[in-house]
Image (spheres, helix red, strand yellow):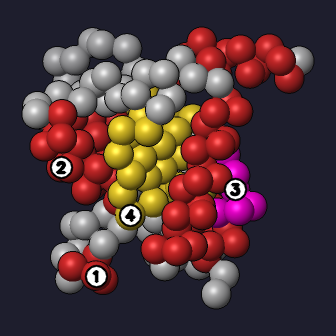
Amino acid sequence: MEKKSQNTFENHFGISEDRALEIMRDLTAYARTAGTPFTAALLHKDGSVFLREQNRVSQEKDASMHAELLLLQRGARKAGRADLSEFILITTCEPCPMCSGAIYWSGIRKVIYGLSVPEIGEAGLSQLKIRMQDIVNDRINDESPDMLIFGGICNDEIRGLFKK
Ligand SMILES: [Zn+2]
């Protein structure tokens, strides 16, 4: 049974669930040193890391500097194009509406996250109560397949980042 779900994950994302777990653990370790629970990475199709980022809102005094948005900006510069459809995005927390919109426009269609929006709320943070799938998979004039979104990896470790 477990093996079956693992295979499904791999069939959809092109990387194993173990590899996603490994990257999420790296992101939580990065989060501990960065002093923010919000970290994210862009992965190549083979699961290797292309780029990592963290939330820099306080550091840069810019409310838009969420980890995912920074990844898209830096990723586009590094790749030399706005289209990032070849990458997988992995993030400790479900992307907010701002980042979800930007991820859609970047062409990325595979997203893996840890804590969901309701779970981030339970951890005590304020959140806009809109789920990523309700933003990116509700479209006009775009009949392409739904974005693949998978959540719930390393939740205990990520919850720990919110406890000071
Ligand atoms: Zn965001």
Identify the amino acid type marked 2.
Answer: Gln
Task: Establish whether ligand 1 lies closer than 8 Å to the Cβ of label 4.
Answer: no
Q: Which residue carries the number 3 mark?
A: 155
Q: Secondary structure at mark 1?
A: helix
The reply to whether discs 1 and 4 touch (Cβ–Cβ < 8 Å) is no
Q: Is residue 100 left or right of residue 116?
A: left
Residue identifier under label 2: 73
Looking at the rendered structure, the kind of residue marked 1 is Gln
Nearest to N terminus: mark 1 or mark 4: 4
- Residue at horizontal 76%, vertical 20%? 5
SS at mark 4? strand
Q: Within 10 angstroms of label 4, few (less than 14), some, or many (20 or more) residues?
A: many
Q: Mark 3 or 4, which is nearer the eye?
A: 4
Q: Earlier in the sequence, mark 3 or mark 2?
A: 2
Compare marks 1 and 3 and give the one earlier in the sequence: 1
User: Which amino acid type is shown beneath numbered disc 3?
Assistant: Asn
Circle 4 residue? 54
- Please tell me which of labels 2 and 4 falls first in the chain: 4
C-alpha span from label 1 to label 4? 10 Å
What's the distance in space between the residues labelled 2 and 4, CA to CA?
13 Å
The reply to whether the magenta stretch includes residue 51 is no
Up the image or down, 109 lies above or below 105; here it is above
